[in-house]
Image: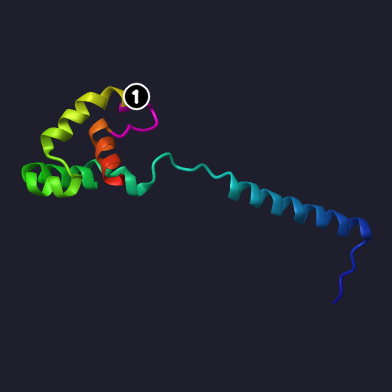
Amino acid sequence: MDVYLSESESDDESLLLVAMIEDEEHERHHKRKCWVHNINKERDILGEYTTLIPQLKADPTRFFIYFRMIPDCFDEILGWISDEICKIPTNFRMPIPPSERLAIALRYY
């Protein structure tokens, strides 16, 4: 059974189809992104800094291999720059502490 649509009905269906597609694309592109990815939500408990650095500080030789400096030197540098690299907490997320920022920078360089 063939159904024939008048030209105006065909145009209405086309417009409706276009509107539906545009709505889907709008929703797909404007979904709210999370501030902190799920992987990073447990960084304070399971992250490399919180699990590894205390162990390295207990073993100065391993700390030196990891950072190329002794723990006292790390603490001295941290004392010099902690005010400059400290961030303010917000309602959205907690900042990375200065000691962890320094550790990240040293490992990067």
Q: Quadrant of residue 57?
A: top left
Task: Identify the image quadrant of the N terminus.
Answer: bottom right
Badge 1: few (under 14), some or many (20 or more) residues near its Cα, within 10 Å? few
Give left or right: position of 1 versus 64: right
Q: Nearer the viewer, residue 62 or 96?
A: 62
Against 108, residue 102 (above or below) is: above
Residue 109 on image: x %, y % = 30, 44
* Element under disc 1: loop
Q: Nearer the viewer, residue 57 or 24?
A: 57
Looking at the image, which residue is at 28% across and 22% down?
83
Q: Nearer the viewer, residue 19 or 12?
A: 19
Is 54 magenta? The answer is no
Magenta-drawn segment: 85-96
* Residue at far right of view: 7
Give left or right: position of 58 versus 98: left
Q: Nearer the viewer, residue 68 or 28?
A: 68
